[in-house]
Amino acid sequence: MNDRIERDGFRKGDLVVVTGGGGGFGRAFCRRFGRMGAKVAVWEINEADGAETARLVREDGGEAQFFKVDLSSATQIDAAVEATTRAFGTPYCIINNASIYPRAPIVEMSGETFERTMRVNIIAPFLIVKAFGAAMIANRRGVVLNIASGRAFEGAPNGIGYATSKGAILTFTKTIALEWAKHNIRCNSIVPGVSFTAQPLENTTPEELVERGRKTIPLGRIGYPEDMAGLAAFLVSEDASYMTGQAIAMNGGRVLIS
């Protein structure tokens, strides 16, 4: 039986918007999609890092442009949306990757720090999806990928803002999936494990991080940004066209979700 509903997926030339594209997971997403033939909008607050990612994408044979944006500012988000649309058109995929992780005990964390964490980690994704949403709905195709964290399930001592925002990302994902399914737009979240990125290396060495992976992760290693990029490539593909509203863990078995 054929229901005549097209199994849509990423097509060469589609636009992918990646927040926090200057390094870590974000750079890996940008480079992977550039190699797949995407137009890549690199959103990043650090000008040198964002420009370098765009250069690497072009070096790989892809098309990319860097857009400087502070995600704590609604005004800058609006400007980046306008500039991205002017340069490339409507996104096929938005990857809400950027986040911040300020550390302090609850009683020592300032309200201003907690509020900024919410603005960057969950309010910015909302504003971005809302801003691009009407055009994506008009196109009747698209994918939103939100980067969550195992901290959404376990909590984060000395990181209440980060854990709270990542928990919110999960329900944010489910709500977009339910509301936009009728428009043929899917939304899933990726739950990365500890990986070779700047965040876990803030308080340790690469050697200590590798040893931590051997001791605490069932598969015996930490992750790499390219692991998450590979999952993202699958989630935008036709092969994942029946998957929406899900949290998919890529963490070597460290946090098991069901």
Image (spheres, rainbow, N blue to C red):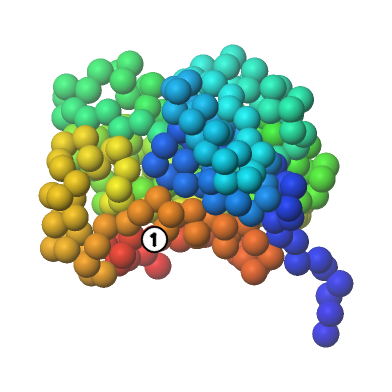
Q: Is residue 104 left or right of residue 85?
A: left
Residue 156 placement (x, y as % from top left): 23, 42
Residue beneath the point at 20% across and 59% down: 213
Along the line of sight, the residue nearer the viewer: 163 or 58:
58
Question: Would you say 184 lies left or right of 236 here?
Answer: right
Which corner quadrant of the image does residue 197 belong to? top left
* Quarter the N terminus occupies: bottom right
SS of the residue at dot 1?
A: strand
Q: Position of residue 101 (x, y in %)?
A: 30, 33
Among all residues in the image, which is located at the extreme bottom?
Answer: 1
Which residue occupies the extreme right position in the image?
Answer: 4
Tell me the residue that label 1 is attached to: 250
Instruction: Point out residue 254 in the picture as x, y percentages from the top left corner.
Output: 26, 62
Q: Nearer the viewer, residue 95 or 86?
A: 86
Seen in the picture, residue 79 relative to 38 is either above or below; the reply is above
Q: With respect to residue 134, does 144 lie above or below?
A: below
On the rendered image, what quadrant is the C terminus found in? bottom left
Q: Quadrant of residue 137?
A: top right
Q: Residue 57, located in which quarter of the rendered image?
A: top right
At x 46% / y 33%, what residue is drawn? 22
Q: Amino acid at mark 1?
A: Met
| Residue at x 82%, y 68% (from the top left corner) | 5
Residue sitting nearer the eye, 83 or 75:
83
Q: Is residue 174 visible?
A: no
Relative horizontal placement of residue 164, taking residue 107 as reference (left or right):
right
Dot 1: within a 10 Å radius of its alpha carbon, few (fewer than 14), some, or many (20 or more) residues? many
Residue 232 place in picture, x, y as percent: 53, 55
- Would residue 18 appear left or right of 91 to someone viewing this image? left
